[in-house]
Image (cartoon, rainbow, N blue to C red):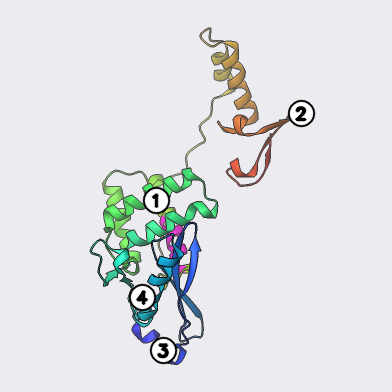
Amino acid sequence: KPSEYNSAFKELVMATLKKRRTKWYSRVLWYDNTGRKKEKQIPLRTESKVVARIRESQVNKHRDEIIELYYKGEIYSFPWMNEDGILKVSRFTIQDAVNEWLGLRKSQGIADTTINRNKISMNTIMDVLGQNIRLSEITTKSVETYTDVMQQRGYKPNGVNINLRALRTFLNWAFRRDYIKKVPYYSMVKTEKSLPTYIPDSDFSEIMKLDMLDTHFKKAFQFYRDTGCRLSEPFVGELVGTILVIPAKYSKSRMEKEI
């Protein structure tokens, strides 16, 4: 709320430059009414430090407005940030936040497969809630509406829960960056526990007797069944004697694994 922007704590410093990867950003810093330091990063959309300094000076002229709009869930859009090429006020939408979140996941060491899964999950959420709603407008009721719609569309509970977990990770990230005041509470869809699927020893023995299988595939099937290896692990690991060592970066648990 604008009232949270207390002039008594308006101890602003000049916007400062920060480089992320190859692009420059302008950091607007201030203190809120609790004395807590806040930061808003404005993308300058350039790799040139000369151009970045010119744009940074424009950011400094409007830092008060940038901070005030921050508490309304809106953003000051500079000419280099929009297709119209003009200075205007834009909403900070869920689409804006999702794009920023996904763009940072790689640098945080998140696997590409996980990022792609997150993208699919968030696309289904924005398909129901809309891409242009303010990030701050996502509430418990919004999530309940999403859950109901997905179940009406025939999605299985486990599939909906995968998307809800991605949403929770995203909202926690947004909360830590002060994009939202709190993470709305919601629960997962209840699921029935099913028995694990496996091939009994008797069936596996019959499979191994099939004439259509050559020795190579029989050995491969036996290897995977006995070791519990994931499909890719024999190809990304290193064989040390009789031990297959899977480096942490290829392990799902992000810990070195020995088989």
User: What residue is drawn where x is 60% and y is 46%?
Assistant: 253
Q: Is residue 163 magenta?
A: no
Between disc 4 and disc 3, the foreground one is 4
CB under 8 Å between callouts 3 and 1?
no
Q: Earlier in the sequence, mark 1 or mark 4?
A: 4
The residue to which callout 3 is attached is: 6
Q: Secondary structure at mark 1?
A: helix
**How far across and down, in percent of the image, does residue 6 sit?**
41, 89
Q: CA distance from mark 2 to mark 3?
A: 66 Å
- Residue 61, placed above or below residue 103: below
Q: Earlier in the sequence, mark 2 or mark 3?
A: 3
Q: Which residues are magenta?
A: 167-175
Q: Secondary structure at mark 2?
A: loop
**Residue type (three-letter) at the residue carrying disc 3:** Asn
**Residue type (three-letter) at the residue carrying disc 1:** Asn
- Which quarter of the rendered picture does the N terminus lie within? bottom left
Q: CA distance from mark 3 to mark 1?
A: 38 Å
Q: CA distance from mark 4 to mark 3?
A: 23 Å
The residue to which callout 4 is attached is: 58
Q: CA distance from mark 1 to mark 2?
A: 42 Å
Query: Which residue of the protein is positioned furthest toward the bottom in this rendering?
Result: 8
- Residue 238, placed above or below residue 18: above
